[in-house]
Amino acid sequence: MNIIRMCVALLGLTLLVAMPAQADGVVVIGHPQLPKLHATVLRKLYTGRSTEVNGAPVIVVNAPPGSPVRNRFLSTYVEQDEERYVAYWTVRRFIGKGLPPKEMDSAAAVIEFVQKTPGTIGYIDAAELRPGLNVLARQ
């Protein structure tokens, strides 16, 4: 009986060590005048199905393609992976339904653009969050 307990404990420990560390969260930030936003609103904005918040025009920006924070954002808020998201925007652009959000080079570029451009929304890794940023949503 003790052998079984030891095996179960060893298996549990092995699984715990083998599990990847939980990824940092995604923080959606916006220009100071923007309100907190629900995930459904963010999905509409990042898929071009909406371009306004409370009647005011909004500009959305993306992190670089393939970046971990972009992958987490797309999975969490847009419910798509990178490939489906690019394909979605390829079709929308082809049929004249808009252009995909501008892609920024880094979290610093997202932060700077959001702070300087009224009506702008972007997202960053939670580790990049600093005081003074307007947090619209957090995952």
Image (cartoon, rainbow, N blue to C red):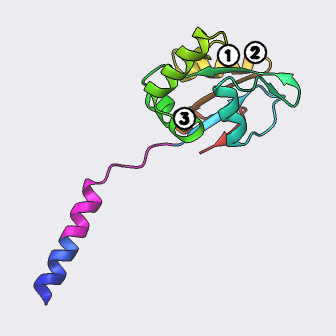
Q: Determine whether label 3 and label 2 are within 8 Å by CB.
A: no
Residue at (33% x, 49% y) in the render = 20
In front of the other: label 3 or label 2?
Answer: 3
Amino acid under label 1? Phe
Toward the front, the furthest residue is 95
Q: Residue 82 in the image: x percent, y percent?
A: 46, 27
Q: Determine whether label 2 and label 1 are within 8 Å by CB.
A: yes
Q: Name the residue under label 1.
A: 113
CA–CA distance in space, label 2 to label 1: 6 Å
Q: Please say whether residue 139 is one of the residues in the magenta stretch.
A: no
What is the number of the mark on residue 117?
Answer: 2
CA–CA distance in space, label 1 to label 3: 18 Å
One can see residue 100 in this view: yes
One can see residue 131 in this view: no
Amino acid under label 3? Phe
Q: Which is nearer the N-term, disc 1 or disc 3?
A: 3
The stretch of residues the image draws in magenta is 11-24
CA–CA distance in space, label 3 to label 2: 21 Å
108 sits to left or right of 44:
left
Q: Which is nearer the N-term, disc 3 or disc 2?
A: 3
Residue at (29% x, 61% y) in the render = 16
